[in-house]
Amino acid sequence: MTAGQRAALRSGLWFLAVGAAAALTHFAVFTLARRVLPPEAANPIGFIIAFWVSFFGHRHLSFSDAGTSAGQSLRRFAVTSLAGFAGNELFFVACYRGLHWPPSWAWLAAAVLAAGQTFMLSRFWAFRR
């Protein structure tokens, strides 16, 4: 395995670990907020909290060799994350309201969809090497 392949594998594994931590944070906050808010309002609150878990984890672990400043990465990651969340929220509402899925299942389906989009935008733009 070449050094480049090892670096890509390391980055990918950290991305999965950080993504899982952020997803668990998002889901936990979503679940707690649903006690007092409709699911469509609880989802953005979970996103806001999980955003910071995701940014710091990706900046320092997944893409630690980023060729961008922290400020530039933050701005780019915010755009990336907001784009991912817009798709997430639209898909969540479609599954929850349109298909009448339970909120937890709709959240999970939307999170999986957003994860792929976020990885691609993060890897090739927000934390570009």
Image (cartoon, grey):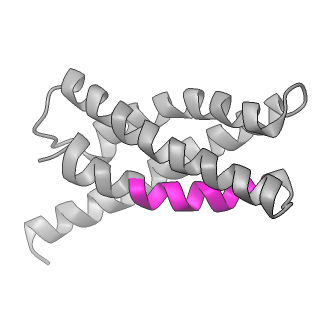
Residue 3 lies left or right of residue 120; in this view the side is: left
Provide residue 128's location: percent of width, then percent of height. Answer: 16, 46
Provide residue 43's location: percent of width, then percent of height. Answer: 69, 37
Q: Quadrant of residue 5?
A: bottom left
> Can residue 30 be spotted in the picture?
yes
Nearest the eye: 76 or 58: 76
Residue appearing at x 27%, y 66% in the figure: 9
Nearest the eye: 71 or 53: 71
Above or below, 80 relative to 36: below
Q: Main secondary structure of the magenta part?
A: helix
Residue appearing at x 57%, y 61% in the figure: 112
Residue appearing at x 52%, y 43% in the figure: 86
Above or below, 71 relative to 26: above
Q: Is residue 60 magenta?
A: no
Provide residue 47's location: percent of width, then percent of height. Answer: 59, 34
Number of numbered discs overlaid on the protein picture:
0
Q: Is residue 106 magenta?
A: yes
Above or below, 119 relative to 83: below
Q: Quadrant of the N terminus?
A: bottom left
Residue 108 lies left or right of residue 122; in this view the side is: right
Above or below, 10 relative to 89: below
Nearest the eye: 55 or 120: 120
> Can residue 14 be spotted in the picture?
no
Query: Which stretch is magenta?
Result: 104-117
Nearest the eye: 104 or 22: 104
Residue appearing at x 53%, y 50% in the figure: 87
Provide residue 123's location: percent of width, then percent of height. Answer: 25, 53
Q: Quadrant of residue 111?
A: bottom right
Residue 65 lies left or right of residue 32; in this view the side is: left
